Image: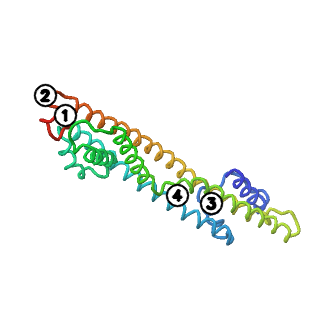
Amino acid sequence: MTLLALVLLLQDVDQAPAGASLGPAPAGQSSSALVEILRNSGLTADVVLVILLIMSVVSWAIMLSKWRSFKAADQQNRRFLRAFRKSGRLSEIAAISEQFKPSPLVAVFNEIHDEYQRQSGGRGTPPNPQGLERAAQTAASEALTLMERRLNWLGTIAQTGPFVGLFGTVMGIIDAFHGLGAEGAATLRAVAPGISEALITTAAGLVVAIPAVMGYNQLTGRLREFAARMDDFGRELLNAIENAALYQPGSPGPLSDDPRRRS
């Protein structure tokens, strides 16, 4: 914005009467100058600004939606973990697991529980522990894919916003030089409108891209946290199943569907 301030100052100097003071312009005058620049901008600058406005609305909608859904998923994760660690049977947890959606841990639990039921009917040692591990990895990957929906749009806006503004900058400079050639003299009045439009579109591109980059980085960091929690929970559930199968007959074991049957 320094170049824009310099251009406006030179324009004031060029139009100011002799002997007038060159003090700082009032805030109202600066804002009115910005409004005047936007009002007198060309078609290319208007199109670029509309595109950037649409990109900004889309990026903020995605960020607010993801922050809200991630907050709900985090709360349900904590509730599901408390219920899981208090319960003593897999069947009890499976019966109430739907209450804790949209927790991604529910998807991991259901996938492991279904695979355990297919292998051993939910009793004893699973004959194929690697199958349970693969089921946990598949469920975690599917849950992350679902949570990542529309984040690619946010990343695209974060990366392309400055370039869209740069396109407006280039076109503004082209218009400035075209006006300079039409006037036939190197006057500030000929080049100032194009330069003003160029700087406005550049600033608008940065205004769109900076929040999108910050939001994308924050959301991807949250996704890594969810992925780590799902991996930890998958290992915890597999350990609980294996430990329950190793209890001696007559001793109560955790997370067993039939405490009378032990391996």
Measure how far apart labels 1 and 3 are at the Cα level: 74 Å
> Which element carries disc 4, helix, strand or loop?
helix
Return the residue found at the far right: 184
Question: Which circle, 3 or 4, is nearer the viewer?
Answer: 4
Q: Nearer the viewer, mark 2 or mark 4?
A: 2
* Distance CA(mark 3)–CA(mark 2): 83 Å
In the image, is 73 to the left or to the right of 32?
left
Q: Nearer the viewer, residue 1 or 122?
A: 122
Q: Which residue is mark 4?
A: 153
Query: Mark 1 or mark 3, which has the lower sequence index?
Result: 3
Quarter holding residue 93:
top left
Foreground disc of the pair 1, 3: 1
In this image, 223 relative to 54: left or right?
A: left
For marks 3 and 2 on the same chain, the one whose residue lies earlier in the sequence: 3
Q: Nearer the viewer, residue 63 or 245?
A: 245
Q: Which mark is residue 70?
A: none
Dot 3 amino acid type: Gln
- Frontmost of labels 3 and 2 is 2
Q: Earlier in the sequence, mark 2 or mark 4?
A: 4
What SS does tag 3 mark? helix
> Between marks 2 and 1, how big is the CA–CA gap?
10 Å
- The residue indicated by pointer 3 is 29
* Residue type (three-letter) at the residue carrying disc 4: Trp
Query: What residue is shown with label 2?
Result: 251
Marks 4 and 1, how far apart in space? 44 Å
Q: CA distance from mark 2 to mark 4?
A: 54 Å
Q: What residue is pinned by disc 1?
A: 254
Point 22% across, 33% down: residue: 245
Disc 1 packing (10 Å; few <14; some 14–19; many ≥20): some
Q: In the image, is 52 to the left or to the right of 173?
A: left
| SS for callout 2 | loop
